[in-house]
Image: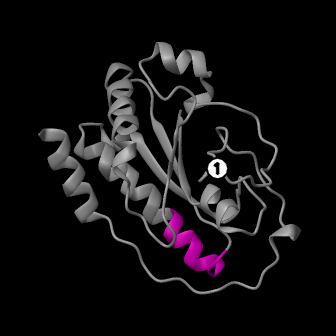
Amino acid sequence: MKTAALSLLMLGLLAGCASVSLDDDPANKKPASAPVSSVDVGGAKSTVVDQPVSGIAGLTAEELKLAGYSMAGETSIFFEFDSMAIGNQYQVLLEQTTKFMKANAQRGLRVEGNTDERGTAEYNLALGQRRAEAVRQALGLLGADGKRIEAVSNGEEKPRSTDRSETGYSQNRRADLFLK
C-alpha cells in the first residue's frame, strides 16, 4: 500500500515538457562512457557506444547482487520522450538504492540526467537536470538522505547509442546512478 501510494505521488509530481528539433549532427560529438550496459528496447537492435560495464559507484554486478540489488548491474532509469516521469518498473531499483544508502551512510549518490539529441542544447541540459532531480526526489520520498544525493545533467553529451532511431534515442533518455 505504501509503495503504491509513493508511486502515485511520484508520478503525480513528475510531468514532461515540450521539445524542439536540433539540427546538430551527433556524429561530430565524442561519446563518453556510460555506467552500465544498455537496455534492449522492444527487441530491436541498435548501435551502442562502447562503454565499460560498471554499476553503481563502480561496483560489479556481483557486488550489487550481494548488496541486495535484484537487478544486478542495471542502475539506470529510462524515460519516455520529453518526459521526466519515472515508470513503476523502477520502484524496486529506487527502493534498493535507498536501502543501500541507509546502510552505507558514508556514501553519497550522484544522479546524472541524460537526453537524446533532439532539442536544443539548452533545453536538453534543463531536461536532463529535471530527470536527475525527479530521481533525487523519488529517493527522498522513500527515505534516502537528499543531502547526500547530487543531481546533475549531461544533456545529450553522454549518449549510449549513436543510432538515430527511436530505439537508439530510447537508450539515451535516462538517469544513471553512481555512488561516490
- The image quarter containing residue 167 is bottom right
Q: Is residue 83 visible?
A: yes
In the orientation shown, which residue stands out farthest toward the top?
66
Residue 118 spot, x, y in % from top left:
65, 77
| Magenta highlight range | 118-128
User: Relative to residue 84, is residue 62 drawn left or right?
Assistant: right
Magenta-span inclusion, residue 124? yes
Label 1 sits on residue: 43
Q: Residue at x 47, y 83 (%)?
A: 18
Nearest the eye: 93 or 32: 93
Residue 67 spot, x, y in % from top left:
45, 17
Q: Residue at x 24, y 40 (%)?
A: 142
- As displayed, is residue 125 above or below residue 55? below
Q: Is residue 113 visible?
A: no
Secondary structure under tag 1 reads: loop
**Main SS category, magenta section:** helix
Residue 99 spot, x, y in % from top left:
32, 26
- The image quarter containing residue 101 is top left
Magenta-span inclusion, residue 69? no
- The image quarter containing residue 165 is bottom right
Count of numbered badges drawn on the protein: 1
Q: Residue at x 57, y 70 (%)?
A: 125
User: Relative to residue 35, is residue 137 drawn left or right?
Assistant: left
Nearest the eye: 145 or 49: 49
Residue 15 spot, x, y in % from top left:
34, 70
Q: Amino acid at mark 1?
A: Gly
- As displayed, is residue 20 above or below residue 159? below
- As displayed, is residue 29 above or below residue 160? below
Q: Quadrant of the N terminus?
A: top left
Q: Residue at x 58, y 29 (%)?
A: 73
In the orientation shown, which residue stands out farthest toward the front?
43
Nearest the eye: 163 or 128: 163
